[in-house]
Amino acid sequence: METSALFDFIRGPLAWISFIVFFLGLIFQFYRFFNLTKKNPHVIYNPRPRKKITGGSVQDFIKRASLSVFGVNPVMVIVTTVFHLCLIIAPVFLLAHNMLLKNAIGISLFSFSESFVDTLTVIFLFCGLFFLLRRILVARVRAITDWNDYFILFLATAPFITGYLAYHQTFADHYRLVISLHILAGELMLMAVPFTKFVHMVFFFVFRFVIESEYSLGKGDRTW
């Protein structure tokens, strides 16, 4: 009876709490972001005209990025891109999740097939393993890694690990426990987004359009 009550709490009230914390946390971070930045007056102290290096087209951004990050470590760029794409696509466009969304608020998104999302999950987990081994085996990365980095990686991969186990019913006799851990892992990750390094998933795009830098996609009219 107590186990059933805990399961109902995890998939009910705690789910709503996690979404509330997620959205209120993002609102707080946006408020903090605009307080820590200011409009850039573009004051030129040198009377001679200078070439503006910020902004530009998407093509310019890709060219600058490819000459810097991609040129230094293309494998890392590819794995990171695939990792983040799977992180977004798999949970958002999963049929089971959209069925829950439909039941909760009456709307649902486009859904990929379960087999396709299952493949994305496996790819995501291999990418996560790559990041883990890189932090352990590469000396220069290990030197700047602390427990928080491992914890963030665990939070990111836990929903996928438990989701994979639940989908394949690896522990069929303990399915309720596995699915409870899956839901709880997803809720913990959602609540952690605004207050951990996960927030870069949102602010990556904000910085590219709002903050002035050589990697800006927009006019970049704010500065730190």
Image (cartoon, helix red, strand yellow):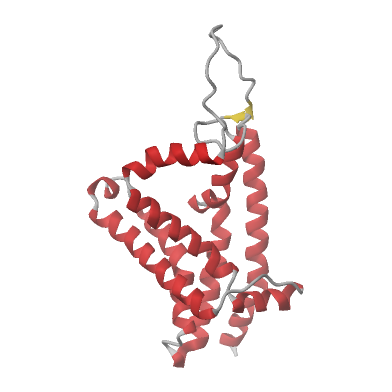
Provide residue 16's location: percent of width, then percent of height. 68, 68
The answer to which of 43 and 152 lies nearer the viewer is: 43
Residue in the picture at 26% in, 56% down: 136
Query: Farthest residue in the front direction?
Result: 59
Give the quarter of the figure containing the N terminus: bottom right
Residue at 41%, 72% in the rendered image: 122
13 left or right of 180 in image: right
Residue 98 in the image: x percent, y percent? 65, 74
Q: How many marks?
A: 0
**198 or 40: which is nearer to us?**
40
- Image height check: is 193 above or below 96? above
- Which quadrant, please, contains the C terminus? top right
Please report the residue visible at 45 percent of the width from the left and 39 percent of the height from the top: 63
Q: Is residue 10 visible?
A: no
Eyeballing the image, is 52 above or below 28?
above
**Relative to 117, 19 lies left or right:** right
Furthest residue toward bottom: 173
Residue at horizontal 64 percent and vertical 20 percent from the top: 41
> Residue 154 appears in which quarter of the rendering?
bottom left
User: Quick check: 95 above or below 87?
Assistant: below
Residue 181 rendering spot, x and y as whole percentages: 50, 76
- Which of the 4 image quadrants contains residue 52? top right
Residue 143 percent across, percent down from the top left: 27, 46
